[in-house]
Image (cartoon, rainbow, N blue to C red):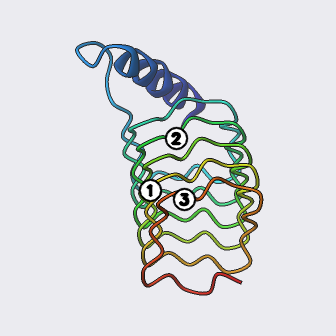
Amino acid sequence: MNVDILKQTLKEHKEWVKDNSKGKRANLGKVDLKRTDLSGVDLSGADLRGADFRLADFMEADLRGADFRGADLCRANLRKANLGRANFSGAYLIEVDLMGADLREVDLRGANLYDTKFFPVSLQVLKLTHTKKIW
């Protein structure tokens, strides 16, 4: 994805988060954003299904309620990210760093969590049904 288009998408999404009658919800589904620095961004409620976020940096990002179903986040950095109510069903979270992340009510059903770093995190009401290899 072109950097200018990404910046515009993030700007419109920020407006949408503040007032959903303004701006536009980010739809980055199936977009190639591998190795992208998204640290500190607000993508709460965004549609990120099937996107390629391999080696992306989401440190301290606000991803509450984001839809990551089927996304590839292998070796991504999600340290200290707010992931409350995010949906990672069927996502690839291999070797992901989730240390210090807020995982309250996160849906990880069917996700591949091989060699993912979890602790310390907030794990309240975490859904782990049918996950593949947590360690």
Q: Are marks 2 and 1 in contact (CB under 8 Å)?
A: yes
Q: CA distance from mark 2 to mark 3?
A: 16 Å
In which quadrant will I find the C terminus? bottom right
Disc 3 crowd, CA 10 A, few/some/many (<14, 14-19, 20+)? many
Q: CA distance from mark 2 to mark 1?
A: 10 Å
Disc 1 crowd, CA 10 A, few/some/many (<14, 14-19, 20+)? many
Amino acid type of the residue tagged 1 in the rendering: Phe
Q: Residue at x 60, y 30 (%)?
A: 41
Q: Which residue is mark 2?
A: 63
Disc 2 crowd, CA 10 A, few/some/many (<14, 14-19, 20+)? many
The circle on residue 52 is 3
Amino acid type of the residue tagged 2 in the rendering: Leu
Earlier sequence position, callout 3 versus callout 1: 3
Q: CA distance from mark 3 to mark 1?
A: 10 Å
Dot 2 falls on a residue whose secondary structure is loop
115 or 52: which is nearer to us? 115
